[in-house]
Amino acid sequence: MYFASDNWAGAHPAIARSLVTHAEGYAPAYGSSDLDRKVEARFAEIFERDVKVFFVSTGTAANSLAYASIAKPGGVLFAHREAHMLEDECGVPEHLSGGGRLCPVDGGLGRMDPKRLEAEIARFPAEFVHAGRPVGVSLTQATEIGTVYSLDEIGAIAGVCRRNKLPLHMDGARFANALAALDCTPAEMTWKSGVDMVSFGATKNGCWCAEALVIFDPALAAEFPFIRKRAAQLFSKSRFVAAQFDAYFEGGLWLDMARHANAMAARLAGHVEASGNARLAWQPQANEVFSIMSRTTFDTLKERGAHLHEWGVPSGLDNGPRDGEILARLVTSFATRQADVDAFAQALD
Amino acid sequence: MYFASDNWAGAHPAIARSLVTHAEGYAPAYGSSDLDRKVEARFAEIFERDVKVFFVSTGTAANSLAYASIAKPGGVLFAHREAHMLEDECGVPEHLSGGGRLCPVDGGLGRMDPKRLEAEIARFPAEFVHAGRPVGVSLTQATEIGTVYSLDEIGAIAGVCRRNKLPLHMDGARFANALAALDCTPAEMTWKSGVDMVSFGATKNGCWCAEALVIFDPALAAEFPFIRKRAAQLFSKSRFVAAQFDAYFEGGLWLDMARHANAMAARLAGHVEASGNARLAWQPQANEVFSIMSRTTFDTLKERGAHLHEWGVPSGLDNGPRDGEILARLVTSFATRQADVDAFAQALD
Amino acid sequence: MYFASDNWAGAHPAIARSLVTHAEGYAPAYGSSDLDRKVEARFAEIFERDVKVFFVSTGTAANSLAYASIAKPGGVLFAHREAHMLEDECGVPEHLSGGGRLCPVDGGLGRMDPKRLEAEIARFPAEFVHAGRPVGVSLTQATEIGTVYSLDEIGAIAGVCRRNKLPLHMDGARFANALAALDCTPAEMTWKSGVDMVSFGATKNGCWCAEALVIFDPALAAEFPFIRKRAAQLFSKSRFVAAQFDAYFEGGLWLDMARHANAMAARLAGHVEASGNARLAWQPQANEVFSIMSRTTFDTLKERGAHLHEWGVPSGLDNGPRDGEILARLVTSFATRQADVDAFAQALD
Amino acid sequence: MYFASDNWAGAHPAIARSLVTHAEGYAPAYGSSDLDRKVEARFAEIFERDVKVFFVSTGTAANSLAYASIAKPGGVLFAHREAHMLEDECGVPEHLSGGGRLCPVDGGLGRMDPKRLEAEIARFPAEFVHAGRPVGVSLTQATEIGTVYSLDEIGAIAGVCRRNKLPLHMDGARFANALAALDCTPAEMTWKSGVDMVSFGATKNGCWCAEALVIFDPALAAEFPFIRKRAAQLFSKSRFVAAQFDAYFEGGLWLDMARHANAMAARLAGHVEASGNARLAWQPQANEVFSIMSRTTFDTLKERGAHLHEWGVPSGLDNGPRDGEILARLVTSFATRQADVDAFAQALD
């Protein structure tokens, strides 16, 4: 019963096979191989427009270099208080952007409130050199707590960005899960809604190491080859990342995997709701389930072989853990078996 | 006839298979899986001592974070004038070390001259805050031009370091090729000769993406988990790197591949020597052959299907290119076929 | 009626004279003159112990380099949500510390609540590389809103630091005003209460440009000459800063100036309290008065020649501005004349 | 006999008086006072065009922030091998530019050879991400060894810059001395010859602390307020720097002081030439004299009360020190008395 994280899973067999297929022969290094080009074209198809695609080694690298690409001296990037960039990246965005700052924005269930965002941005008047100045906004889709911005909600954030002339970045570490949840096109969830660049993650969804920064505006992308290289993120045998993406997109595998993970999360949530020993902290929308339970129940689950993590309680949560209770996170993935989900229900009884 | 670079090759089948083998199942992320631990133990065996091993995504990352781990405000790192860190890393060492500086050191055939090194270090008197201060030395083994430091030569550099209380880093992007050339043990080529840490590269020698910083002194390694994470170089599915190293070391595969590459380079060098249309710039010791030829010959070779690069002429080279001549670099790898080497001889005729 | 800021004042005549006195003759540069040494000895007397004193050009430099001196990869510094470092330094601490992060801590009236501080620190478990790690705490004395930590309150913050093995920095841009308010010794307000280093500001209190970082622990200070130089903060004619401090300390001038400024603030507060057109937002303790008034009153005051600033309302303020009201800041200094303070009372009527 | 450095001198009485004059009263902080504006207008007059002027605390800050203002990821700045930025700034340019790199350029007597400059720039082909890319050129006027670029020589460097689309910075720590040597206008020595920005130093020439970055192109200057603030280089009581410049320019005082310093250097050089115990290493053009003498003579001079420094021998010097000889540097300033110069002649006998 592995629900600790989607990065505990391995790789989908089709992706493993693709790596073997491309192991032979010679190809130019540093992203200039035919396979690299084919995959970039595939991204363009998927996003229904020309895009610039830059492979990097981790999602944190994609996010941090996205920030670096829009950073200015004294710049401030706005993100949800519980965003990965703020909570789980060990100061990488600050470091790789040359000393940038992240400003936390509040909002319920992992999503920035556009009004709060606007208010935070307004704290930095233009030309007031002492406070610093806004340089961009980052939203996480799906959020860190397994919820999803609707297209309207993305549009509302993008509207704030447009009024303040700020680029909008999407941390898409779980891009596919969000897309499956919204059942819309990648274009709709991104540039058609006002997003300027995406950290497009595939590692958590069935790859070994496949992360890309996708930039829609060629002008924004112009400096990026140097920004990536300067952070030691340019793979020599780049084609091995391309090989993963090649299989990932083939026949819609990526969406199949995301739909499976989401369905397993929904099934898990159903078990939690049905149980008398735990309750849902909120309704899951992607592949993460957050459940409130007594510490005793939590410990029992672990003894019975369930892998899951205790989690920090988000600020502003109604009906959160009471005395003796904790919040637990369960994550599903492409590899989650229904049998394990159902075994969890039994373990919870 | 692919001699453009060893990073144009793919992956050895055994390494590809290892990735498939480990694609299934669940394992803790971020380097804490059983396979990660097994591989770290394997490194300890190979180096005949406890070591700390940190996977990163590129050789440039390994070098730059090695620098970051010993950097101090105003610090200067010494390396050969034509070292990868100085010539091919786009300022990454400076950036990731927080603004460090590299000081070029001269020396014949890619190897620092210990006397020149000592003289350069002496330009930075202790306590003279204006000039900055030495923080370490990096040597490249095999060098950028396919030569190799002998054990005595490494020891001489290490002696300078010891007298000046400076840590010594080895850029081992082609560690295996150098080891095969010297026919000594990894321990002899490193810590027994006074080396404190090694960028241990396997990507150029048959892996897809397998680079590690190996640190011998636990005190030097204490901060490294944060240094690596802070540079966005901590893989979540770290075990996929471990899987490559696992197969790499199995049954001495790594040395077999390196010996093959070196032998192909020697054979290629023999062809060059035997030819009337080109000559060796210097005797190769590892898997790179540098040859002087007329531009016409160079162009003809390319027309005939040879992949090779024109190369900058190292300073201080005796008997270098004359008018109308250029320096060409040819690199062999685990994947180089003898037939291609011999075809090159014909193309050169 | 100049109450816009204490940095709108010029310099005390005795300090101006000292600069003239020391304008003649020759002296070694970069802090090694006799006068530099004399002033460092004076600091030691004042703090009743050996200290290391480093002049820098601005208070922001002192704060940021204090941070740099304790920074580690992934490090987080804790400060009050409305601290100068967080609100008015344009990302300098992040930049000069090589990409550090500041974590805001709440607390009433500009002072960190020790329990909140402890809770924030606890969010960063040791060895959990993703979140980053605590590296220090900074408190502002007097605070940005003119209040003062008592010795017990400093001790409580220092206790949290000690338990968590974190160095404690004091931003003393208004050190003298706080000292005059507490009527204690510099030693009591700093190292005897657990403070490890102080940004000792004199610019706001009658100098032109006299800021120093005072470090109590020689081990903490060992790297600082390079940290300062590396930030371009080493004055060549350092003695001109020394000359200001020389006069500043002479005959207790610094405390006389601070007491005057505080007394003028108290008098101003009395006028506000007595007026029907404004009220105190809280009781001033040093040289800043915060008053709530209608925007109409604010505008009238400015028309009548008063220089004062509208100010952001601190979070968690009871009894703050109501509809149509604003918060205004008034700052006094060594140069404030009682006649102007009383003229303000009339303008307010 | 103080010839150790021009920064051992104090301040000219007129400049000291100006500080006293402006010590009284109130003025807006951070560079927005009337006096700040008046001085900026004065700079515009002197340079015969609109300019942007930014005060900073040290010449190293001016140079490093000039670099920061044109830095790009992977960027390389070109300067003479013995430039202050390379030899005496402790890595500040690298640090404050966010990890930039300096590339040394050779050339006789402290001046870059335009052909060597062009050759160094050519080592960084556009789009070749591995090597990095040129971002600017910095020349020092007067040079570190007391020579001066002629207008034609500046124009030749500027021509290389123009062909490579690179901005040209002038390190003018001894701007006035160079100007006096060339007997041309500030405009001719800078923008009319193709210079884009100048570190305009006055500290060495009779001020206490008066350094400014002067930027000719408003577009290049647009980001600079944030760049300066972000480096903690924005003085609150900025008017005290303005006060120094105000007196510095008044009645041509700055040029009078520079001419005096240069004349004293010429007189000193005459004494050296006339002496049998020392010889000129090269002909001085500004306010520095470099002399070759035996170590015995050097020691005797110091015993007899002369302050002077032994100096590193520039590369490529013809007729340099022979066995037992050293190179000594003597610097004159506005404060150098002819009697001391003549006393040196006697001490040398």
Image (cartoon, coloured by chain):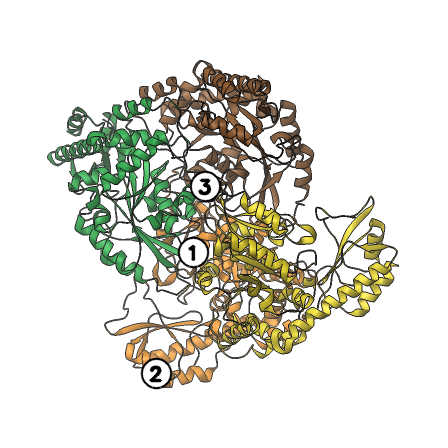
Chain colours: A brown, B green, C yellow, D orange
Instruction: Output the chain of dot 2.
Output: D
Looking at the image, residue A248 lies above or below residue B213: above
Q: Amino acid at mark 2?
A: Leu
What distance separates the C-alpha of mark 3 from that of mark 2? 65 Å
Q: Amino acid at mark 1?
A: Pro
Tags 1 and 3 both on a single chain: no
What distance separates the C-alpha of mark 1 from that of mark 3? 24 Å
Q: Secondary structure at mark 3?
A: loop
The residue beneath circle 1 is B73
The residue beneath circle 3 is C129
Q: Nearer the viewer, mark 1 or mark 3?
A: 3
Q: Which of D203/C212 is in front?
A: C212
Q: Position of residue D302 (x, y in %)?
A: 36, 80
Residue D348 - label: 2
Residue drawn at the location 54% of the way across and 52% of the way down: C93
Q: Is residue C24 left or right of residue C344?
A: left
Question: Within 10 angstroms of label 2, few (less than 14), some, or many (20 or more) residues?
Answer: many
Q: Position of residue D119 (x, y in %)?
A: 35, 48
Image quadrant where residue C330 sits? bottom right
